[in-house]
Amino acid sequence: MHLWIVTCLGKRFRDALNEVVTVPLEKALNPDDQQKYLCRKSDEILTLLLDQKFSPEEAVQLVVKKPLQGLFPEKVTKGLHLV
C-alpha cells in the first residue's frame, strides 16, 4: 500500500483526481467519505504505477474504468510524475 505517498500528494491531488474518478453516491454520504474513496483510488493508481510499472495515464485509465477522453487534470499529471 502507498497511502503515505497519497498523503504526501495531498488533498489538491485528490480533488483534481475527482475530476476523472466518479465517486458513487453511496460512497459519498459526507465529505470525509468522498476523500476516503479518493484515497483508496489514489492508492490503487499508485500500486499500478509503482509496483506494476504502468504509465500514469494507463494506471488512471485502469482504475476509473472509463475512457479519459483527454480529461487528465494537470495536477494529477504533475503529482503522478513526482512519484
Image (cartoon, helix red, strand yellow):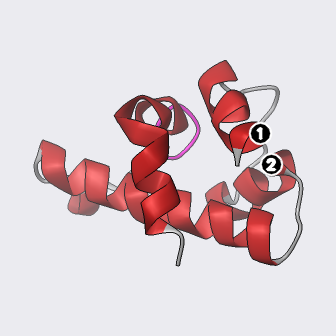
Report whether residue 25 is seen: no
Span highlighted in magenta in the image = 18-22
Distance Cα–Cα, label 1 vs label 2: 7 Å
Q: Which mark is residue 81?
A: 1
Dominant SS type (magenta): loop
Q: Residue at x 49, y 35 (%)?
A: 13
Task: Please say if the residues under marks 1 and 2 sit with CB atoms less than 8 Å apart.
Answer: yes
Pick whichever of labels 1 and 2 is earlier in the sequence: 2
Residue 51 locus on image (x, y percent): 77, 77
Determine which quarter of the picture holds residue 80.
Answer: top right
Give the residue at the far left of this rendering.
30
Q: Which mark is residue 56?
A: 2
Residue 70 locus on image (x, y percent): 81, 26
Q: Relative to the observer, which residue lies in front, 19 or 39? A: 39
Amino acid type shown at disc 2: Pro
Q: Residue at x 50, y 29 (%)?
A: 16
| Residues packed near mark 2 inside 10 Å, few (<14), some (14 to 19) or many (20 plus) | many
Q: Residue at x 64, y 36 (%)?
A: 79
